[in-house]
Image (cartoon, rainbow, N blue to C red):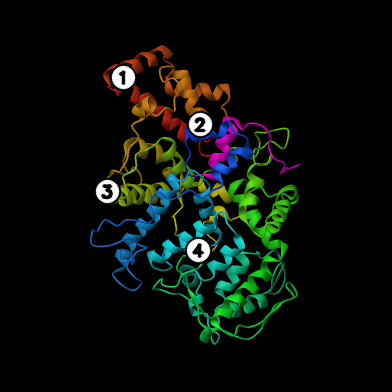
Amino acid sequence: MASLSPLSGVLGRRRAAHLLRRTSYRFTKTKVDELAALSAAQALPLLLQLYPVQVEQPHYDDPLTTMVNENATWCLPYGMGAPVEQFKLRRFVSGWWLNEAVQDPGIGHKMSFFFHQFLITDILSYGTEHYFDYLGLLRWGALGNFKKLATKMVTDNCMLRYLNNQQNSKNSPNENFAREFFELFTIGKGPQIGPGDYTNYTEDDVVQAARVFTGFRVQGGRNKFDAETTLPHGVPKLNFHDTGNKTFSTKFNTTISGASSEADMLRELDDFVNMIFIQPETAKNLCRRLYRFLVSCNLTAEIENDIIVPLATTLIANNFEVKPVLEQLLQSQHFFDADDSDNTDEIIGGMIKAPLELALQAITFFQLPIPDPITNTVGHYVSFYGSGVQDRMLTMANLQLFFPDNVAGYPAYYQAPDYHHQWFNSSTIIARYKLPAMLLSGKNTIGGQVTRPIGTKLDIASWVKNSGNITDSTDPYVLVNDLLDYLLPETPTPERFDYFFLDVFLTNLPPADWTYEWQDYLTTNNDANVKIPLERLINAIMFSPEFQTF
């Protein structure tokens, strides 16, 4: 029986590493060790909070321009400048987000990305400055109130354009946004039970919802601000709005009074959202998606009854605050695979890493130096995060960050039955297996082009010597064991350990040979004889099936 009962006792390294891998893009030995000494209840407050950002906004390297939140002249206003300029500037917005994700010791960016996948727009939907606002809204709602976030997303400038609500008027209704708000953003369809009739709503309900959404328009100048989020947003325009009453089907048994003013349009919107959120299926739909994102795609009848339904009850009881649900799920016996007799069979190591986890957790574990975003903007945004991380580590591994395939998002997060298995296939395997080569060489090694520096490099001998991640570098057994303990989700069997230790690292030479070579390196600072076995080991670990999972 799957159990949401809290896990008792100290986490230990294995469970602490699992918790950190699933909740944060910043994975470090120091943080694992910190969490390992705590219980799940003690560890979660360190993760379930929004930490301050390192850099408030992207920086562009032209000294004649300013930053995005001043007057947006580095992010050219919509319609100004050649498209190639907007294309260049998009790297700065996504590079800024990635750098903040790397620096974030908590769940903030992981949940921001979850809600991006849930309430999706792409970075082409409007100007880069508007997308910066959209990312700000996701951050605002990451650990907050899902109902409020869904409501505010209706007036997000990017969303209004992405789902064509800019063209939704009383005399020419456009149902696109209304349809996706039902199907993808909130309650979900459920199985179809008749023509135009789904389990949770009907086609007629989509028509009525589109009438509610008429007249909400973008505010391209970014000069209208939400009082609660302080972010720019779109505005209601009564002359485009259908002011008649909206009567919904027996799924809802609700008639919403039409608005009589622009301010009243927001009341009408609230009435509509309340109508959807009062349905129990809306809470269940969010909890299912959270479960697939953080725990497993294996949603059995047992999981539905024992995990999803109680989580939805918690969500409703807390008026759709997300944090109490995360607290309940992430300290549960089920999350730590401790609710049955076999605690190694389904959760820990049970998902294939998405490219974000694969790349960013490797970057943070190996403490790669990252070019400074203020003093070296080209190296930071263009070479490292642009060419290295986005183009090679993410896009070529089938995650084109902020360029989702469609309004449903990135297929591996929603497309049954494969889900996360789509991250590992013939089209992505090269990018995944080239990751250690990129880190160790400091160059782009994918794509058949002339290799170029990526703005950083893992000096593996220096890292082993100075990082503090290895207990005793002179002892080859300890060195290999330390790396496997933190880089793999489960402790390897003795036979598997011997493969990494004897076959890969020592190449069946006596352990004393390593000790001699390492001591010689410490004396001479010449890493020629220790670099090769270390790189061989890192490649083998990161190539392993175990490393590809979390």
Tag 2 or tag 1, which sits nearer the N-term?
2
* Nearer mark to the viewer, of 4 and 3: 4
Q: What residue type is labelled 2?
A: Tyr
The residue labelled by disc 2 is 486
The residue labelled by disc 3 is 375
Q: How crowded is mark 4: few (under 14 residues within 10 Å), some or many (20 or more)?
A: few
As drawn, the label of residue 521 is 1
**Is the residue 170 above or below the residue 420 in the image?**
below
Q: Is residue 295 visible?
A: yes
Please indicate whether residue 41 sits to the left or right of residue 425 in the image: right
Tag 3 or tag 1, which sits nearer the N-term?
3
Range drawn in magenta: 1-24
**Is the residue 332 above or below the residue 251 in the image?**
above
Q: What residue type is labelled 4?
A: Thr
Mark 2 near mark 3, Cβ–Cβ under 8 Å? Answer: no
Q: Which amino acid does label 1 sit on?
A: Tyr
Please indicate whether residue 188 sits to the left or right of residue 116 in the image: right
As drawn, the label of residue 229 is 4
Q: Say which element carries label 3.
A: loop
